[in-house]
Image (cartoon, grey):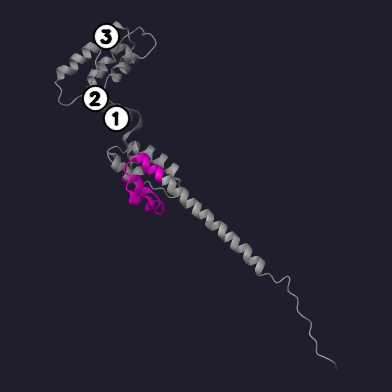
């Protein structure tokens, strides 16, 4: 399949009118390609030949050929392309050592002093390098929840949400609740200190004079 897409991006000149290359291709008879495994090789080959022929008729550029071919991929075929493209890019420009380092960061990631928003952003950034570790929504939720601070995790763990967006939202709500509780405690301590200072002052106390009676 990789060779198929490489051929699609073969040398060509000319240009195609403005507009969606995908729509232009489909309006000229190209078909969506959905699968890889279990499909006879000649099926992919025939699909490619049809796409190439229409692209040549439209005088597509090299960039338009690749973009157009990818736009026709669906389901398993598109997921395959995403995997190949990312692996090829990382192998050429990023390097395995960098990817491994980010993966280790992800495995060690916990919230600590970060806000939930900051923790979520870091979690999502590093999870891109650990696709083999968090392959399902359930695994992503479990790992995110495990990294939360204890005071937040105890509030949301019993609910066992396994939708990531819902889990993050509930973590934010729990964080707001804890913040409000902390602010209320600080206000109460401030009131108690002021009350003690007022009632405990000796500034207004005067000693009564002593009378010993007539001499």
Mark 3 vs 2, N-terminal side: 3
Q: Earlier in the sequence, mark 2 or mark 1?
A: 2
Residue marked by disc 2? 77
Position of 173 with respect to 195 (left or right) is left
Residue drawn at x 29%, y 27% as measured from the top left: 82
* In this picture, residue 201 sits left or right of residue 41: right
On the image, the x and y values in percent for residue 182 come to: 50, 55
Q: Residue at x 29, y 12 (%)?
A: 25
Residue 188 percent across, percent down from the top left: 56, 59
Q: Quadrant of the N terminus?
A: top left
Horizontal and vertical percent position of residue 161: 33, 45
Q: Which residue is mark 3?
A: 54
Q: Given the current orientation, which residue lies at the most extreme right position?
A: 215
Helix, strand, or loop for circle 2? helix
Residue 91 position by quadrant? top left
| Mark 1, residue position | 87
| Span of residues in magenta | 142-170
């Amino acid at each position: 399949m990789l060779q198929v897409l490489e051929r699609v991006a073969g040398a060509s000149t000319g240009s195609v009118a403005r507009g969606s290359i995908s729509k232009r291709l489909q309006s000229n008879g190209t078909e969506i390609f959905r699968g890889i495994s279990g499909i006879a090789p000649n099926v992919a080959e025939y699909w490619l030949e049809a796409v190439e022929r229409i692209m040549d008729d439209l005088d597509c550029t090299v960039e338009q050929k690749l973009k157009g071919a990818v736009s026709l991929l669906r389901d398993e075929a598109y997921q395959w392309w995403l995997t190949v493209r990312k692996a090829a890019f990382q192998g050429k420009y990023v390097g395995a050592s960098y990817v491994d380092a980010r993966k280790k960061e992800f495995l060690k990631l916990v919230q600590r002093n970060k806000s939930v928003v900051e923790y979520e952003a870091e979690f999502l950034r590093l999870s891109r390098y650990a696709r083999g570790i968090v392959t399902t929504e359930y695994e992503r939720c479990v790992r995110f929840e495990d990294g939360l601070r204890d005071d937040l995790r105890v509030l949301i763990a019993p609910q066992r949400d396994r939708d990531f967006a819902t889990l993050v939202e509930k973590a934010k709500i729990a964080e707001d609740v804890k913040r409000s509780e902390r602010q209320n405690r600080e206000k109460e301590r401030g009131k108690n200190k002021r009350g003690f200072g007022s009632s405990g002052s000796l500034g207004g106390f005067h000693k009564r004079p002593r009378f010993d009676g007539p001499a």
